[in-house]
């Protein structure tokens, strides 16, 4: 099981929780489970270019097509971040 940190704008879709625990050995499985379990989160994955994913604090450089090959181990922390630009 991995702990997934949910960005503030999307917490309304997970009953206000900051984090959820999801089973899955691959990042693609975790993303599918999140989108299936919490329908409102699917829009977060619609444009992955606007989403940064960190696993145990390290930024993931894999494109969505490669998420199937990204292993997520028991106890890993997956953090979803929506980058905000300003100036």
Image (tube, grey):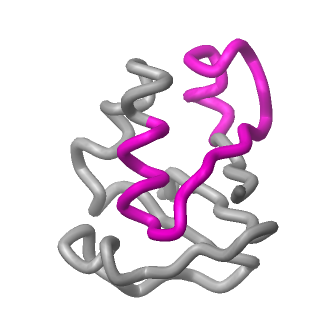
**Count of picture labels:** 0
Residue 45 in the image: x percent, y percent? Answer: 32, 45
Rendering quarter of residue 9: top right
Query: 62 or 33: which is nearer to us?
Result: 33
Residue 37 in the image: x percent, y percent? Answer: 48, 25
Query: 68 or 47: which is nearer to us?
Result: 68
In the image, residue 33 lies in the stretch drawn in magenta: yes
Q: Please give left or right for residue 42 compared with residue 79 in the image.
A: left
Q: Please give left or right for residue 7 compared with residue 16 in the image.
A: left
Q: Is residue 34 above or below residue 13?
A: below
- Which residue is located at x 23 percent, y 42 percent? 46
Query: 49 or 18: which is nearer to us?
Result: 18
Residue 77 in the image: x percent, y percent? Answer: 74, 65
In the image, residue 19 lies in the stretch drawn in magenta: yes
- Which residue is located at x 36 percent, y 44 percent? 32
Q: Please give left or right for residue 46 compared with residue 23 in the image.
A: left
The magenta span reads 7-34
Residue that extends furthest to the left in the rendered view of this protein: 65
- Which residue is located at x 71 percent, y 56 percent? 1
- Which residue is located at x 56 percent, y 17 percent? 13
Rendering quarter of residue 75: bottom right
């Amino acid at each position: 099981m991995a702990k997934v940190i949910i960005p503030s704008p999307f917490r309304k879709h997970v009953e206000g929780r900051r984090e959820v625990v999801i089973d899955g050995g691959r990042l693609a499985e975790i993303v599918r489970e999140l989108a299936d379990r919490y329908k409102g989160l699917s829009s977060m994955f619609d444009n992955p270019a606007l989403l940064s994913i960190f696993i145990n604090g390290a930024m993931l450089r894999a494109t969505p097509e490669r998420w199937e090959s990204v292993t997520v181990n028991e106890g890993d922390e997956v953090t979803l971040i929506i980058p905000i630009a300003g100036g």
